[in-house]
Image: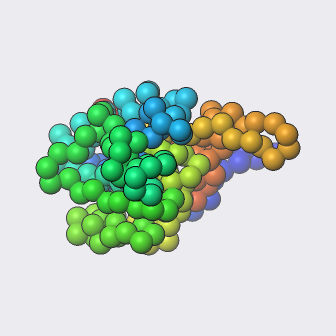
Amino acid sequence: MSTPKTLLEMSGANMAPPSWDDAVLVLIDCQQEYVDGALALPGVAPALKECAKLLDLARGAGAPVVHVVHHGPAGGGMFDPEGPSGAEAAEVTPLSGEAIVAKGLPNSFAGTDLHAVLEATGRTKLVLAGFMTHMCISSTARVAMDLGYSNTVVDVACATRDLPDGQGGVLAADDLHRAALVALSDRFAVIVKDASVWS
């Protein structure tokens, strides 16, 4: 039996991560909700540390950076844009001039100006990182491909949470994270382990 290959590999796609001279870093939902809120993630600390490394690399190369933040209902609940849960984590605090795109749905393009912000950079190669792997990272990468972008997702810079498996058990966060990345790797994104691929 032959070794399985992704559709990207079968099509002869370039599997190397993009140069920062050509790429845009898109940080998705790196917010306090996932640090110490109702959706605190088990792997959030190392993921944010890796996001900070990516941010340093992008800034050092002069690459565009886009911060996508989720806005829930104002005045309470999860991702409150007026409260601490909606704030970006300290590790990835935006600098002046870096774009901030607010969204209300998992797909970062839905109802936002993200596509226009990216088009204005003149670049079509995206480096995606943030939260949650199976939700906003996955949905954004899938739509980005439809819009003509090529995606690289950084494994260690993403994380998710345990979920009920629908059969009376629990799918562990690490397993869900891995499955989500494997699914993306088939057609929607090149998956790299961490920021060291650019060193």
Q: Quadrant of the N terminus?
A: top right
188 sits to left or right of 198:
right
The total of numbered circles placed on residues is: 0
The residue depicted at 49 percent of the width and 71 percent of the height is 146
Q: Quadrant of the C terminus?
A: top left
117 sits to left or right of 112:
left
22 sits to left or right of 110:
left
The residue depicted at 76 percent of the width and 36 percent of the height is 170
From this viewpoint, which residue is outermost toward the right? 167
Q: Position of residue 76 (x, y in %)?
A: 44, 49
Quadrant location of residue 172?
Answer: top right
Is residue 122 at least partly visible in the picture?
no
The residue depicted at 52 percent of the width and 30 percent of the height is 43
Q: Position of residue 41 (x, y in %)?
A: 53, 34
Q: Position of residue 73 (x, y in %)?
A: 44, 58
Colouring mode (rainbow / by chain / secondary structure / one colour): rainbow
The front one of 176 and 78 is: 78
The front one of 81 and 150 is: 81
Is residue 134 at least partly visible in the picture?
yes
From this viewpoint, which residue is outermost toward the left? 96
Instruction: Judge whether 72 appears above or below 3 on screen.
Output: below
Q: Position of residue 193 (x, y in %)?
A: 47, 35
Quadrant location of residue 46?
Answer: top left
The front one of 91 and 155 is: 91
The front one of 99 and 85 is: 85
The residue depicted at 61 percent of the width and 55 percent of the height is 186
